[in-house]
Image (cartoon, rainbow, N blue to C red):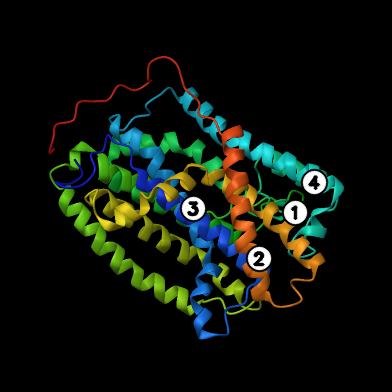
Amino acid sequence: MISTTGTPPGRHLPFLDGIRACAALWVLLGHCHLFAFGWQRSQSPWARPLDLLLYMHLGVDIFLVLSGFCLALPVVRHGNGLPMRTRDYFLARAWRILPPYLVTLFLILLVNAVVPLAAWGRHAAGPTSAIPVPVLLANVFLLQDVFPSTNVINGPFWSIAVEWHLYFVFPLLVAVLRRRGPAVLLAVGAAIAIVLTWLRFRYPVLSDAVPATIPEPPYYIALFVMGIVAASLAADPRFQAMRARLVRYAGIAACVLCLPLGAVLWTYRIIDGGNVHRFFDHADVIDPLAGAVTAACLLLMCGLPPRHRLRRFFESPSLVAIGGYSYSLYLVHIPILAALNRWIDYAGVSARSAGTTLFVLVAVGVPACLLFARVFARCFERRYRPAGRPAHRPAPVREGA
């Protein structure tokens, strides 16, 4: 077991779905706030808690760490090897990610052919009914992280491209984990992130002829690796004897790391549209700190007893259900909110106050997004079930080694 009171590593961990749901809702409500107020913090101290919605980008950080954690759990339980053939692994990832993504892209393009996105987005920036071929190709082949200027069809698509490319690196990271352990893997992830980030600053555009960049953001591989390392510490039998101490240290680390994260967020806090670039200009510091806090919290959560109030909150049926279709929710929420926001403009609601717009977006748009995403997920989200034996046989691991 992870601890004397924690969750056995072989069981499903429903709190992961709850955390995933909270991250998705943060992004969803953040975009509601963005449609209504833009990058404008609240003027009233009573509404100041709403300013947290401006930092919805941190929800994407949580998604990336969770992705590494969830992918690594079956690997760690399988003796630090892929629990299936490499070919089946890639098919499973493609089957999981691509169908919902491509269907969402098709639906957006279908609507765009009638009502151009520039007419129903939150601002005039966006493609017209005649989408340029490079933009279309980059979105079809998930290259928005390499060609950032093409990410104009649906904002959240950029992070899907990042995760899709990280899937190709995952088997190599697993090999490092199996041969060298989590500490070396963490060092390798940090080194790659530093080198790629330096190259991104040194060469903003790789070629004048082809405006490609180092995959954006280059340091997200570090967040992905943090999730893998957290899964290793949480479930690898080799750490059984020290599990309780690891969980305790994770709690301390989470608290300690919150101090520099809070300081950086305060220093580069978002005030309005004029200074929001300061936040994103320092994302290479903010995101790794947020990723480290997330990874530490995941390890801590694994060590909590099932009846702990924090576990019970994240394992509530409503959150677990939303977490089950959070990927679809992430894909489809922007077009739905944008369409509703366009209707609000036509109806003259936005002329009354931004607060009224936010209320309508939350009261009508959020349930609409949840309902549509749930139906969408049932139709298009599928799991790939590989046949045959796994490629890697788990090596016997002595308890407490």
Measured Cα–Cα span from mark 1 to mark 2: 45 Å
Kind of residue sitting beneath label 4? Val
**Would residue 161 be visible to someone looking at this image?**
no
First-in-chain label (1 vs 2): 1
Q: Nearer the viewer, mark 2 or mark 4?
A: 2
Circle 1: residue type: Asp
Based on the displayed image, in which of its 4 quarters is residue 13 positioned? Answer: top left
Could you tell me which residue is drawn at 16 percent across and 41 percent down?
A: 240
Give the label on residue 243, or none: none
Of the image marks 4 and 1, the number of the one nearer the N terminus? 4
Q: Residues within 10 Å of mark 1 (few under 14, many from 20)?
A: few
Say if mark 2 contacts mark 4, CB within 8 Å: no
Disc number for residue 208: 1
Quadrant that contains the N terminus = top left
Q: What kind of residue is marked 3? A: Tyr
Say which of 18 and 206 sits in front. 18
Q: Which residue is mark 2?
A: 360
Q: Which residue is mark 4?
A: 111
- Taking 43 as reference, is 106 above or below it? above
Q: CA distance from mark 2 to mark 4?
A: 23 Å
10 Å crowding of disc 2: few (<14), some (14-19), many (20+): some
Disc 4 crowd, CA 10 A, few/some/many (<14, 14-19, 20+): few
Q: Is residue 391 above or below residue 310?
A: above
Q: Give the Cα distance between marks 2 and 3.
A: 34 Å
Precedes in sequence: disc 2 or disc 4: 4
Asked if residue 366 can be seen in this view, the reply is yes
Residue 220: assigned label: 3
* Image point (61%, 35%), residue name: 98
Looking at the figure, which quarter contains the C terminus? top left
Query: Which type of secondary structure does the marked residue at label 2 adopt?
Result: helix
Identity of the residue drawn at 49% across and 61% down = 58
